[in-house]
Amino acid sequence: MNSLPTQPDSILIRSTNWIGDAIMTTPAVRSIRKNFPDAEITLLALPWVADVFASCPHIDHIFLYEKNGRHRGLMGKLRLARDLRRKQFAMTILLQNAFEAALITRLAGIPVRAGYTTDGRGLLLTHGVRKQPDISTRHQVHYYQEMLAGLGLRTGDKKSPLELFLDPGAVQEAEALLKERIGAEDKEKPIIGLNPGAAYGPAKRWPAVKYAELAARLAHESNGLILIFGTQADQEAAAEIAAGCNEQVLDLTGKTSLALALACIDRCHLFVSNDSGLMHVAAALNRPLVAIFGSTDHVATGPHSDTATIIRHPLDCSPCMKTHCPKNHFQCMEQITVDEVAEAGIKLLQKKIANKD
């Protein structure tokens, strides 16, 4: 494999498609910038991922892949390739693994195309990296960093910490929103975030009835404000959770931009979440975090954080990586009790309050 150009004037990074995956690429994005400090770097991202990088200092521009708009379907992909061709990028690094990503950048005429050779796309790449057989036994942040190392780039800190930069406007909006619920006399009141949803499927979701019991207990024991995060799809679960918390809850499901949700999570003294994109947000923001795992792999996609506690009950069939429980008993989640989640959360909350950081 030929070496990558040492001083490309412009680089296109193809982002991953999900919020959690995008968060886990942040060390790789940082590594790309450190290797090419003078390059103009553009990130190609789907609209719902763009806010993850909107304030990132390592990115100069964000190019939206409007998959449900002007770039929809086959003609839309050809239009995207033409749009990218006009930018005359010198090089692209594909963090997303799909065949489509390599094909579009090939059609765009980008002369240097680098990434993993997975999904049968090796012939479309000028600089391909073979995936190491043992990579699935390590956290996913290393998956992206090892691809860069395979391209001859320096990846820095072996721990590869996550990072997330907040939009200043969203931070102000979050402060104003929370100030309405927490008066000046209660400014030390704990803020606890709950995330009962998970986009991948119901197998990743701890039951809403358990979140409701947890919320009531945490509200009682901490006298804090409970924030419920999620999309419109989570509003039914949020209503069930809120019902037992009286006035101590603020339901944000489907009511915020991603940028505002990130800023609100940053204000939380404790965050409890299923394996989801917002779990990775809390990890990147170094929030005290209880992460509930059932059907998915806590080693590969667990919170990459020193302030997180993972709760799981391993079974012979877990992690199955399925969207729905294939055995229809859901025991990997049903066996996780409210008591153990609450105890882990209260311990983290007390430590956070004691440190006052």
Image: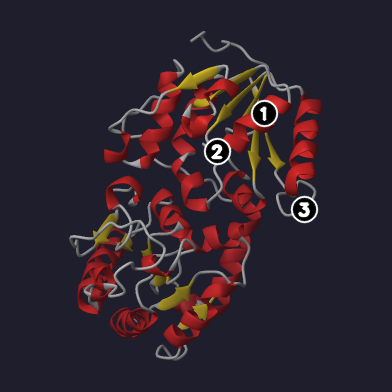
Amino acid under disc 1: Thr
Assess whether mark 2 and mark 1 are in contact (beta carbons under 8 angstroms). Answer: no
Instruction: Decide: few, some or many residues near mark 1? Use Cα within 10 Å; few <14, some 14-19, many ≥20.
Output: many
Query: Which secondary structure, mark 2?
Result: loop
Q: Is residue 163 above or below residue 223?
A: above
Mark nearer the N terminus (3 vs 1)? 3
Mark nearer the N terminus (3 vs 2)? 3
Between 150 and 265, the one nearer to me in the picture: 150
- Give the mark toward the camera: 3 or 2: 2
Amino acid under disc 3: Gly
Q: Which residue is mark 3?
A: 69
Residue 193, percent across and down?
42, 69
Q: Is residue 310 above or below residue 178?
A: above
Whether residue 332 is visible: yes
Residue 18 is marked as: none
Query: Which secondary structure, mark 1?
Result: helix
Left or right of residue 325: residue 247: right
Whether residue 253 is visible: no
Tell me the CA gap for discs 3 and 2.
Answer: 20 Å
Left or right of residue 198: residue 326: left
Amino acid under disc 2: Ala
Which residue is at a point 30% across and 62% down the rendered structure image?
293
Instruction: Decide: few, some or many residues near mark 2? Use Cα within 10 Å; few <14, some 14-19, many ≥20.
Output: some
Tell me the CA gap for discs 3 and 1.
Answer: 19 Å
Residue 136, percent across and down?
31, 39
Which residue is at a point 53% across and 17% down the rendered structure image?
127
Residue 98 is marked as: 2
Q: Which residue is mark 1?
A: 105
Residue 12, percent across and down?
64, 29
Query: Which secondary structure, mark 3?
Result: loop
